[in-house]
Image: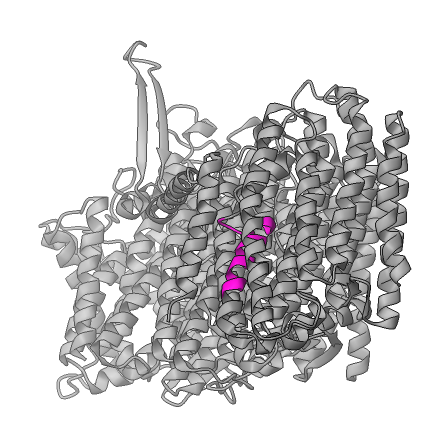
């Protein structure tokens, strides 16, 4: 397929998304029709995108689409190179699943304003496409801001809840500020490169302090989008606020735009940097990972829990990114390739399983009307497909074999394992060891977290009336979930093709070499990098697991037919009620206690002494944690700003004399200033 | 061409006088709209002719790329303001804020306000330019005080006082410029004529021109609402009748910026002066953006909120002018156009809100999106537009100015960006407050008059279209204007 | 290769209950009891495999699947260990850790599945223990594998053979022994002999299991225990005095049962720790591993 055809394909995709918008507007009087047509078109657009991205990724050739000249800023072009195609592929998978899911999910939202939802959804997808495809800073920023705006509107779509509006406000202000840093980074490069096209930015010649500055600006800018702690405060508020199919894209894809941007900046524009760049990225990555998962584990709101867990996963991705940068600067291109591949693959995998989890959580929330884990339970019988899909997602996110999360986690572990090769000396060793401790702890906490979510929400008995009467979601919702679950399994068992595509993505960049990095032979996946080797045989593993399970089945039936008798559970002689079950708060208790200095957990117990002290004493128990970053940074800064603002406002109190005085003072100052030698 | 300019000046003059004779308010409003339509049509015609024929100069009037751009702004804004005046005045009458007698006076002032602005723009002589700017102050002060209640009188009083001091500075600067011209030996040409100045200014005594520049920038800066001379602006803009607020914020500030730009074109002929003037403008610009922050973060009055947003945007434009590079100038000129359109429309929207909710208090205006969904959408879009977000033209122009800032180093640009982020935080915070939440129970929203929708919709349409595409002729105009302001002479 | 692997898996699986029985027997002897025969676990398993099962009415397919997957994971681990020669060149240590993680994940879910609050508590504690053990486990690995440059087990064992009883390995051995204790759920971390006591971890998650499913789960726990011991032996006691006993197999057996005895000894000589004292215990392991790293 040549360029021209891919060109046309791209425009067809754009037109399909736009048609999706228009049709929703045109059909606004009949929400049902608008829903099907508009979301169906979105799914169609995603299918085209999938084909387009797949072709580019397989061929390794970039597609260049010239748009026009823009003011003084050079040629505006869209360029879908393998890096962009890789992320477009993720968008197409997640977006497609979310579009189909939306048909069933949003059917609950029919109202006068319904048409806005599919319109925004299509626009959101489209602007994200342009974020990945733009090859010009201006166009990129337009797409970036449009993505923010459309997602903001989706976040505040359910504006009846004041919390959603508040979340939208924090979200948009944080990202606007983040974008300010991005713009600064772009413009510093533009000042050196001449104009704003990405082509001119490639390996742009900057002085070292300028490069450091651009690195930091891009890190803050994209870090805000990625929700790196301490720039994360918007994320756990905004992601749960959006409708669930949008949450899936927010967490699954939009966070990855930050990883995409970092790859663009650090691989393509800035090239190999000093070691401290990578070390810094790793540092923020590990803090995000650990704190993110701790907060996730403490959370009882299912969607907010998933949002916090996104922090953790982005932290893990950053570990790969940072390790890649460290290896690059240490002159170890193969290991750099390994680390970057780990980062990209984990970004991809996280996109898929997090979207899956959000979709499933959305189905749960819709069926039960609550996001509180403590009110759920027993859904595995009421919603079997949703439960199965969530189960696969939980396994994958806990990076357990044989699912996709494990492969990328394994690659990340491997690249960190080799880190002492780049960071020599005892400090390097210790740092590497501490990283390992933190990452291992993170992995275990994630597992604990998702045992909690799945165990509390889906297993045992319902803890509330609503959960008791929940109904399985329609097939338009379960189908995409199961599809994504299938993708988790596929990339867990067949990671080779994707890893080889990733190595094609990374090959062109300076300081990275992926040739022969991932070898596939009859045993399985091998990584080979000068002094580093690793081997992972997924097929063998799957085979062994299967054989083991079959052996277990053999033993099970070894001594005849199995008889199962059902009986109630034992609860110390009393009839067990759902209230006897372990709660989500209780489940996370030991971890909360161990990390109490980080989590600042507080509990409040109210005992009603008036009642009879022997039976039926009333007990109220309240457990909360305090967010250390908010308290240490955001609240003081906010207070400081408001205090300063209040002070400044006094400067303009309404007295005309004072105002005229200002003019005169300014005149004097200006004259004195202009008269200086 | 000369006739056209005369026509453009005559129509508002005649209409302004004629409207006094009309007793019925509605008729007066429609008559006013017709007058404005005619004026705008003439102005557009002038612009078209200019694009085809090029610069023009005759009998004290002149047209070049720079003032044609501003004529465009006046043409669009006077039209939308006239359009919006119809429902606005009707509503005010119904609410009893005004009496029928006052209406003709309003339209009289309206037309004369437009007249003085056009006059300012077409003046060839910098001295007469000053006179015309002073005339705009006179007429607009009467408009600010139009409702003749305590607060509007106080606002007008502040406006006149502060601006008089400022404009005195501008006069002093203009006289100094004249003195520089005389001292350089150019006594035979027209004193302070633009053409004479642009031909010879590079031979003037730099020290004198620099002094004049300082006074002129402070003087017209006061009129343009640059901090810290902006103190009159929030009061005046919030107390004027809302269509006029839109005109004040969109058109009059632009006209004041025009005066600065025209004089800057002279200063830029002398590189040393141009540099100092530029630095001063950059300083004023940063200060304006900065000073808007606290007032936008803690604000109770919706119209004052918008007024401070004007201060911020004018600051951004001053930054662009101050940078002096083609990129900065281009961005500043484009931002002038975009901001004028966006800000005036936003004022119309706020005016409608104030009338519907009968309060200017942001805290009492709630749930706009539920009461008036389309209108709420427009409000949000316009706030995003004046905050410089895509897909609106303001984003492009803001981006261009900021990009230009980074050519001279990074910290100023980053500072401006962060200040803009703080400004945005304030704007969006209050916008979300307005849009969402529970609307007051006793609120019975009236149907929106189509005039408002048309005026605001037209502005939005223009903004979105400039967001993606700057027409070739406009681009050419902007480039030519950049050359003029940058010190390239005619 | 595949056949050898399977043979090894079967061998380890069959041997695993013996180690458990041996440890129990040693413990009894150390406590001046006669104790059951070391073969008792085989009898137990055989008996359980014939029994009917009583299943909680609230349990779902998760409870049903868990024993099979846990057993499968145990088999996979058993197959991947580098026992015969130096492995197959395909066994990765991280993989083994995560396979343990898989069975722990499912077991914890199964604990929550029935709605029994004891089992829920067990799940919670089991996952909490994992938070402490996994870092120590991985760190002990890094301490030994770091010098090798790979986490492939066979290569690690080769390296360990070449550098046995150097300071890093001795220190790491201490670290790893603590991990073995924790992973096998032995005193002072967990008490494998009790049911229905508020100190329990893994045993609690099994509380609703009975009959064949319990047999499978117990067996997989035994296999896991043996796997940990084998790992420990392979990495830290790779020496063979062939003059004494020429057979590699017998040497291996001797070492494994020696470690079993050590475990029994620790169990007898220490008391069960409080849950919240465990971080300190495992921190000791981490510290040893760090020292091993620095000493390298």
- Quadrant of the drawing holding the C terminus of chain C: bottom left
- Quadrant of the drawing holding the N terminus of chain C: bottom left
Task: Name which quarter of the figure residue C266 lies in.
Answer: bottom left
Q: Is residue B360 left or right of residue A22?
A: left
Residue at x-position 78% and y-position 25%: B102
Q: Is A232 located above or below residue A566 in the figure?
A: below
- In x, y percent, where is residue A21? 79, 53
Q: Is A307 located above or below residue C257 in the figure?
A: above
Q: How many marks?
A: 0
- Asked if residue B227 lies in the magenta stretch, the reply is yes
Q: Is A56 located above or below residue C205 in the figure?
A: below
- Asked if residue C88 lies in the magenta stretch, the reply is no
Which of the colour schemes (rainbow, by chain, secondary structure, one colour) is used?
one colour
Nearest the viewer among C175 and B188 is B188
Query: Can see residue A644?
Result: yes
Task: Name which quarter of the figure residue A114 lies in.
Answer: top right
- In x, y percent, where is residue C128? 32, 49
Q: Main secondary structure of the magenta part?
A: helix
Residue at x-position 32% and y-position 59%: C222
- In x, y percent, where is residue A662? 45, 46
Nearest the viewer among A193 and B14 is B14
Residue at x-position 53% and y-position 49%: B423
Query: Can see residue B302?
Result: no
Q: Is residue B53 left or right of residue B308?
A: right
Identify the magenta region. B211-228
- In x, y percent, where is residue A636? 35, 44
Nearest the viewer among A216 and A616 is A216
Q: Is residue C295 left or right of residue A349?
A: left
């Amino acid at each position: 397929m040549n360029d021209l055809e891919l060109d046309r394909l791209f425009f067809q995709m754009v037109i399909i998304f736009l048609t999706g918008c228009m049709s929703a507007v045109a059909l606004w009087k009949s929400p049902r029709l608008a829903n099907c047509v508009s979301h169906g078109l979105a799914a169609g657009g995603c299918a085209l995108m999938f084909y387009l991205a797949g072709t580019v990724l397989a061929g390794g050739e970039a597609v260049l689409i010239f748009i026009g000249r823009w003011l003084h800023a050079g040629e505006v072009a869209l360029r879908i190179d393998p890096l962009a195609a890789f992320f477009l592929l993720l968008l197409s998978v997640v977006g497609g699943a979310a579009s189909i899911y939306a048909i069933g999910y949003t059917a609950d939202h029919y109202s006068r304003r319904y048409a806005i939802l599919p319109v925004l959804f299509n626009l959101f997808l489209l602007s994200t496409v342009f974020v990945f495809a733009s090859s010009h800073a201006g166009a990129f920023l337009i797409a970036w801001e449009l993505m923010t705006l459309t997602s903001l509107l989706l976040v505040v779509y359910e504006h009846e809840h004041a919390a959603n509006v508040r979340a939208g406000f924090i979200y948009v202000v944080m990202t606007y500020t983040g974008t300010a840093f991005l713009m600064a980074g772009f413009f510093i490069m533009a000042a050196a490169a001449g104009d704003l096209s990405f082509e001119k930015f490639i390996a742009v010649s900057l002085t070292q302090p300028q490069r450091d500055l651009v690195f930091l600006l891009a890190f803050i800018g994209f870090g805000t989008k990625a929700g790196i702690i301490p720039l994360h405060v918007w994320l756990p508020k905004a992601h749960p606020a959006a409708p669930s199919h949008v949450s899936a894209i927010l967490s699954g894809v939009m966070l990855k735009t930050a990883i995409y941007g970092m790859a663009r900046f650090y691989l393509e524009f800035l090239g190999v940097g000093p070691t401290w760049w990578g070390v810094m990225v790793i540092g923020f990555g590990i803090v995000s990972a650990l704190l993110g998962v701790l907060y996730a584990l403490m959370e009882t709101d299912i969607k907010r829990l998933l949002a916090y867990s996104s922090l953790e996963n982005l932290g893990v991705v950053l570990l790969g990114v940072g390790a890649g940068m460290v290896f690059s600067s240490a002159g170890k291109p193969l290991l750099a390739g390994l680390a970057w591949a780990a980062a990209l693959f984990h970004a991809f995998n996280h996109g898929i399983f997090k979207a899956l989890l959000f979709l499933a959580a959305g189905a749960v929330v819709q069926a039960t009307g609550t996001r509180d884990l403590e009110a759920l339970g027993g859904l595995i019988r009421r919603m079997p497909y949703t439960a199965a899909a969530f189960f696969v997602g939980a396994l994958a996110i806990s990076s357990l074999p044989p699912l996709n999360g494990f492969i990328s986690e394994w690659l990340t572990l491997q690249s960190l394992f080799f880190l002492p090769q780049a960071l020599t000396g005892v400090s390097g060793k210790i740092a590497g060891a501490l990283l390992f401790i933190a990452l291992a702890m993170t992995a275990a906490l994630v597992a604990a977290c998702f045992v909690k979510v799945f165990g509390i929400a889906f297993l045992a008995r319902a803890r509330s009336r609503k959960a008791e009467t929940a109904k399985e979601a329609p097939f338009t919702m379960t189908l995409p979930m199961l599809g994504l679950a299938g993708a988790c399994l596929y990339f867990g068992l067949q990671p080779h093709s994707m890893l080889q595509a990733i190595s094609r993505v990374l090959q062109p960049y300076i300081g990275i070499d992926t040739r022969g990095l991932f070898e596939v032979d009859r045993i399985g996946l091998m990584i080979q990098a000068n002094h580093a080797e690793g081997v992972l045989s997924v097929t063998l593993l799957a085979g062994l697991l299967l054989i083991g399970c079959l052996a277990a089945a053999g033993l099970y039936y070894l001594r005849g037919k199995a008889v199962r008798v059902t009986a109630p559970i034992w609860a110390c002689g009393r009839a067990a009620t759902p209230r006897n079950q372990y709660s989500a708060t209780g489940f996370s208790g030991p971890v909360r206690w161990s990390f109490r200095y980080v989590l600042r957990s507080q509990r409040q117990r109210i005992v009603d002494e008036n009642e009879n002290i022997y039976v039926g004493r009333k007990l109220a128990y309240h457990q909360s944690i305090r967010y250390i970053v908010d308290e240490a940074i955001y609240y003081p800064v906010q207070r400081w700003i408001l205090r300063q603002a209040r002070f400044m406002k006094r400067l303009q109190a309404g007295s005309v004399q004072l105002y005229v005085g200002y003019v005169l003072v300014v005149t004097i100052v200006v004259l004195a200033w202009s008269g200086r030698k | 061409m000369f006739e056209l300019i005369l026509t453009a000046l005559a129509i508002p003059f005649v209409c302004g006088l004629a409207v006094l004779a009309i007793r019925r308010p509605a008729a007066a409003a429609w008559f006013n709209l017709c007058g404005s339509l005619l004026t705008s049509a003439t102005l557009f015609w002038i612009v078209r002719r200019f694009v085809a024929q090029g610069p023009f100069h005759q009998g004290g009037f002149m047209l070049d790329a720079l003032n044609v751009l501003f004529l465009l702004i006046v043409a669009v804004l006077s039209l939308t303001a006239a359009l919006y005046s119809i429902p606005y005045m009707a509503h005010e009458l119904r609410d009893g804020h005004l009496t029928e007698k006052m209406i003709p006076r309003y339209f009289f002032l309206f037309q004369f306000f437009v007249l003085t602005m056009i006059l300012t723009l077409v003046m060839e002589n910098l001295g007469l330019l000053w006179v015309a700017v002073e005339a705009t102050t006179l007429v607009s002060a009467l408009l600010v005080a139009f409702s003749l209640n305590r607060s509007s009188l106080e606002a007008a009083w502040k406006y006149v006082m502060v601006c008089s001091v400022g404009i005195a500075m501008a006069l002093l600067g203009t006289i100094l410029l004249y003195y520089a011209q005389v001292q350089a030996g150019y006594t035979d040409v027209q004193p302070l004529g633009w053409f004479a100045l642009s031909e010879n200014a590079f031979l003037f005594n730099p020290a004198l021109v620099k002094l004049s520049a300082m006074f002129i920038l402070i003087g017209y800066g006061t009129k343009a609402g640059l901090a810290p001379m902006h103190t009159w602006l929030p009061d005046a803009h919030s107390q004027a009748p809302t269509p006029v607020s839109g005109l004040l914020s969109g058109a009059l500030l632009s006209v004041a910026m025009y005066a600065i730009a025209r004089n800057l074109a002279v200063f830029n002929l002398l590189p040393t002066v141009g540099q100092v003037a530029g630095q001063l403008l950059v300083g004023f610009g940063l200060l304006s953006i900065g000073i808007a922050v606290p007032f936008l973060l803690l604000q109770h009055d919706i119209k004052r909120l918008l007024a401070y947003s004007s201060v911020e945007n004018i600051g951004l434009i001053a930054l662009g002018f101050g940078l002096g590079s083609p990129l900065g100038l281009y961005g500043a000129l484009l931002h002038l156009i975009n901001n004028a359109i966006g800000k005036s429309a936003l004022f119309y929207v706020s005016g409608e809100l104030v009338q519907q909710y009968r309060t200017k208090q942001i805290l009492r205006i709630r749930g706009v999106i539920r009461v008036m969904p389309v209108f709420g959408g427009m409000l949000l879009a316009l706030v995003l537009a004046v905050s410089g977000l895509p897909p609106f033209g303001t984003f492009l122009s803001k981006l261009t100015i900021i990009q230009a800032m980074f050519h001279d180093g990074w910290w100023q640009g980053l500072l401006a960006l962060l200040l803009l982020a703080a400004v945005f935080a304030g704007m969006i915070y209050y916008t979300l407050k307005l849009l969402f939440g529970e609307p007051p129970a006793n609120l019975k929203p009236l149907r929106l008059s189509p005039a408002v929708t048309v005026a605001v919709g037209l502005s939005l349409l223009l903004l979105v279209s400039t967001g993606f595409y700057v027409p070739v002729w406009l681009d050419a105009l902007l480039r030519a204007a950049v050359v003029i302001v940058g010190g390239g002479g005619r | 290769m595949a056949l050898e692997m399977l043979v090894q898996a079967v061998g380890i699986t069959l041997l695993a209950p013996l180690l458990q029985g041996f440890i129990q027997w040693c413990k009894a002897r150390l406590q001046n009891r006669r104790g059951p025969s070391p073969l008792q676990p085989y009898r137990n398993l055989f008996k359980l495999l014939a029994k009917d099962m009583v299943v909680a009415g609230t349990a779902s397919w998760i409870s049903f699947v868990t024993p099979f997957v846990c057993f499968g994971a145990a088999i996979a681990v058993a197959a991947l260990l580098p026992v015969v020669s130096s492995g197959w060149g395909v066994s990765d240590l991280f993989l083994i850790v995560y396979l343990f993680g898989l069975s722990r994940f499912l077991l914890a879910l199964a604990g929550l599945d029935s709605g029994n609050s004891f089992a829920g508590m067990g799940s919670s504690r089991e996952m909490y223990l994992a938070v402490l053990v996994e870092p120590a486990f991985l760190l002990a690995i890094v301490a030994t594998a770091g010098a090798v440059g790979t986490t492939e087990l066979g290569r690690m064992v080769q390296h360990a053979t070449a550098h046995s009883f150097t300071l890093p390995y001795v220190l790491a051995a201490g670290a790893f022994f603590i991990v073995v204790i924790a992973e096998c759920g032995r005193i002072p971390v967990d008490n494998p002999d009790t049911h229905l006591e508020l100190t329990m971890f893994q045993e609690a998650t099994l509380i609703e299991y009975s009959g064949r499913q319990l047999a499978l789960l117990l067996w997989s726990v035994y296999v896991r225990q043996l796997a940990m011991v084998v790992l420990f032996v392979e990495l830290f006691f790779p020496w063979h005095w062939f003059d004494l006993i020429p057979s590699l197999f017998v040497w291996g057996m001797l070492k494994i049962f020696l470690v079993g005895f050590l475990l029994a000894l620790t169990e007898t000589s220490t008391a069960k720790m409080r849950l919240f004292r465990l971080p300190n215990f495992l921190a000791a392991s981490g510290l040893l591993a760090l020292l091993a790293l620095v000493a390298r």
